[in-house]
Amino acid sequence: MHSETSAPKEAALYVVATPLGNLQDITLRAIEVLESVDLIAAEDTRVSRRLLNHLGVRTALTAVHEHNEASASARVIELLQRGGSVALVSDAGTPAISDPGALLVRRVRDAGLRVVPVPGPSALTAALSVAGLAQREFLFLGFLPPQAAARRRALEAVRGLACALVLYEAPHRVRECIGDLTDTLGGARELLVARELTKLFEQVHACPLAEAGAWFDADENRTRGEFVLVIGPPPTAQDGALDEALRVLRLLLAELPLRQAVKLCAEITGVKRNLLYERALELKSAEGAPD
Ligand code: SAM
């Protein structure tokens, strides 16, 4: 295997993804980089020290968070210009994704120095990987504004987009956010709740937005922990036509042999015969009735 960038001694800022919860989710390359750089710039040095202790890494740490990113960038750039190497980490997941780091990355690049990604976990990709979205396109919104009015405006601005929406949300706001999602986007869109990914109480639940409030209310533990919310795309006119075709198909199947029901349904609704045939077989086998 080709591993051109495995030795991180080169003067560069390495942007290193760290585990979301399960400490096993760290790449071999991330460990190698964290061990061999001169300095680790961390969102919260206490949080990162715990991970580094677990890994047996003794590299020096400095804090780079949203309140000191500009001044810390100057120090990091100075070190890189002297030929040093620095790793950037956040508390969990990939730095600069709804986390500090983007300003540092930009300043380092603007100074003509190298920025190297060391990819790994992110709550965004972990949630999408289990969302089973039929469609490829999604829009990542990060955290919505905390104020209800601004949150609704943000959702109204993206309501009509024909793609999935992905949000991060805090536990104390998740229930309120579900109310706003349902009111602005409608109850028919599918919601995937990805809670506490890679941790002890990991939970992945999918339901229509209309049922999400009741699902959260059924168990207070469901509003605890960390959340990614994935909202499926709005139903299309084609989805509506298919729903109607399936209604007609059910009625015809109750009266006619399968082939004839499929043929008639295709003629009535204009939906493709192959698709109806597959659905008819599924309906029949769900009923357990012989064709
Ligand atoms: N940069 C991080 C990443 O790449 O995932 C995200 C940082 S952001 C400050 C933290 C938010 O990410 C949490 O509020 C939650 O929405 C989401 N998150 C982080 N860890 C998670 C987990 N284990 N399960 C579900 N969501 C998580």
Image (cartoon, grey):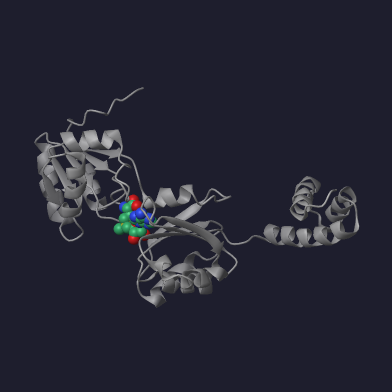
Quarter of the figure with residue 18: top left
In the shown orientation, is residue 209 left or right of residue 11? Answer: right
Tally the numbered discs.
Answer: 0
User: Which residue is depicted at the point 29% across and 25% down?
Assistant: 4
In the shown orientation, is residue 164 left or right of residue 253? Answer: left
The x, y position of residue 263, in whole percent, is: 87, 50
Q: Nearer the viewer, residue 281 or 157?
A: 281
Quarter of the figure with residue 228: bottom left
Q: Nearer the viewer, residue 10 or 265?
A: 265
The x, y position of residue 276, in whole percent, is: 78, 50
In the shown orientation, is residue 238 left or right of residue 145? Answer: right
User: Which residue is depicted at the point 36% across and 52% down?
Assistant: 199
Vertical position of residue 176 compared to residue 100: above or below? below
Vertical position of residue 240 compared to residue 184: above or below? above
Instruction: Indicate the quadrant of ligand 1 in the picture.
Output: bottom left
User: Which residue is depicted at the point 36% across and 48% down?
Assistant: 122
Q: Is residue 50 visible?
A: yes
Quarter of the image with the N terminus in it = top left
The x, y position of residue 61, in whole percent, is: 12, 47
The x, y position of residue 38, in whole percent, is: 12, 38
Residue furthest to the top:
1
In the shown orientation, is residue 270 left or right of residue 192? Answer: right
Q: Is residue 97 visible?
A: no
Q: Nearer the viewer, residue 25 or 277?
A: 25
Vertical position of residue 185 compared to residue 17: above or below? below
